[in-house]
Image (tube, rainbow, N blue to C red):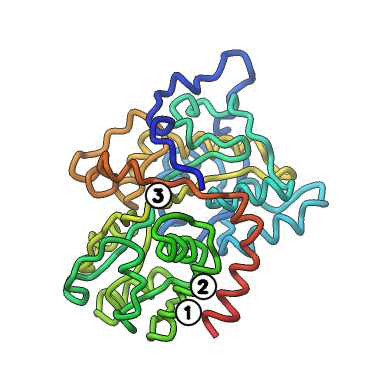
Amino acid sequence: MATFDRRDLLKGAGAVALASGLGMPALAQAAGRVVVGTWGGDYARLLTKNIEDPFLKSKGMEVVQDQAGDAPRRAKMVAERRLPRGTVDIQGLSAANMFEMNEAGVIETIDYAKIPNAKNLIPAMKYPYGVGHIYSGNVVIYNPKVITAAPTGFKDWLDPKHGNKIGFIDIQYQSIMIAASLAGTNGASMNDLDKAKEVLMAVKKAGARVYPTNEAFAAAMKNEEIGISAIWKARVVQWQNAGIPCEAVAPVEGIPIYVSGFVIQKNAPNKDNAYAYMNAMLEKAAQEAFAVDMGYNGTVTGLNVAPDLQKRIGFTPEEEKKLRDLDYAFLAKNDSAMKEWWDKVFKA
């Protein structure tokens, strides 16, 4: 289990400054088309609002979103790899799924000389095969009206005593199993799937509920049908802004990080515009807007985020020491088995 290196996260842009003369920047052209694979919902809407409209469409680029869950989009990437030209230029994926698609051999090695704004990219968010866009940490979320004793971590969340007040979001199965592993091992491991299954089956028997989407879960939290779960801290901020009574707790067992980023398919029809999209997403104005609109931390240095907002979306110095990067190789190897168990055993 790797510990998230906060020193790397805070290094200045000088550590990643690109030597001049390595290649011409891929700036948005006055015409052209880029197809973006992404999740739907708020994220897709904010990509349009904060990146596509101000930095790409305003320069004449046509942007088409291919909206779907990450699993079908990853399957399509693999299915299309033998084609000379794929159907998508750039794909939005989690860091774990970026790793998995790199292992599958379907994505480009990033040429950072083609992304001028990469000079400001935090080193920890600069992958050989993808670029981090936003990040947050997995925290316990609870409604104080329903759960009167404040939890301290994942173990408190996954306590069968909460019965049907425990909620899960179906699409978050991977992060749920990581949290359950940490709960079952008192923070010793994120990869103990046997312990995770034991913990989860206990709360299933107690009546825990599974919701198909973030939105369905939020509605259940608002009407007090459920009272406790775990989610990215950014999502807690969004729901607080929407008037949902909920609080975030940094788990004592450790805080797994979540990175959302973008990769370029090897057979992308328009790689230049894919690079232009990456450059636009690293614009400081776009990054600052995502902090305000979505509660995620930006991946470039020098952002101007209001102190009160930074306090809500970020982490204290003590909490920063508990940030943990994920074991992407382990997740790539075990994701299919995790999903199968989740669908056929836990949800059955």
Q: Position of residue 176 (x, y in %)?
A: 46, 65
**Residue nearer the viewer, 249 or 180:** 180
**x and y, in percent, of residue 196 in the image:** 49, 68
Q: Amino acid at mark 1?
A: Met
Mark 3: which amino acid? Lys
Callout 2 crowding tier (Cα within 10 Å): few <14, some 14–19, many ≥20: some
Residue at the disc numbered 1? 201
Q: Is residue 55 above or below residue 343?
A: above
Q: Relative to 227, is 174 on the left or the right? A: right
Secondary structure beneath dot 2 equals helix
Tag nearer the camera, 1 or 3 = 1
Measure the C-alpha gap from mark 2 to mark 3.
40 Å
Residue name at image x 44 percent, y 45 percent? 53
Residue 263, compared with residue 215, is above or below; it is above
* Residue density around tag 1, few if under 14, some if 14–19, many if 20 or more, within 10 Å: some
Q: Quadrant of residue 159?
A: bottom left
- Check contact, mark 2 vs mark 1: CB within 8 A: yes
Relative height, residue 213 to residue 164 (above, below): above
Rendering coords of residue 152 (x, y %): 26, 61
Discs 2, 3 touching: Cβ within 8 Å: no
Q: Earlier in the sequence, mark 2 or mark 3?
A: 3
In the picture, the quarter occupied by the C terminus is bottom right
Q: Residue at 47% x, 39% y: name it.
A: 281
| Viewer-proximal residue among 180 and 31 | 180
Residue that badge 3 annotates: 49
Residue named by callout 2 = 197
Closer to the camera, 176 or 110? Answer: 176
User: Could you tell me which secondary element the residue under label 1 belongs to?
Assistant: helix
- Which residue is located at x 21 percent, y 74 percent? 147
Name the residue nearer the viewer: 17 or 137.
137
* Distance between the alpha carbons at the discs numbered 2 and 1: 6 Å
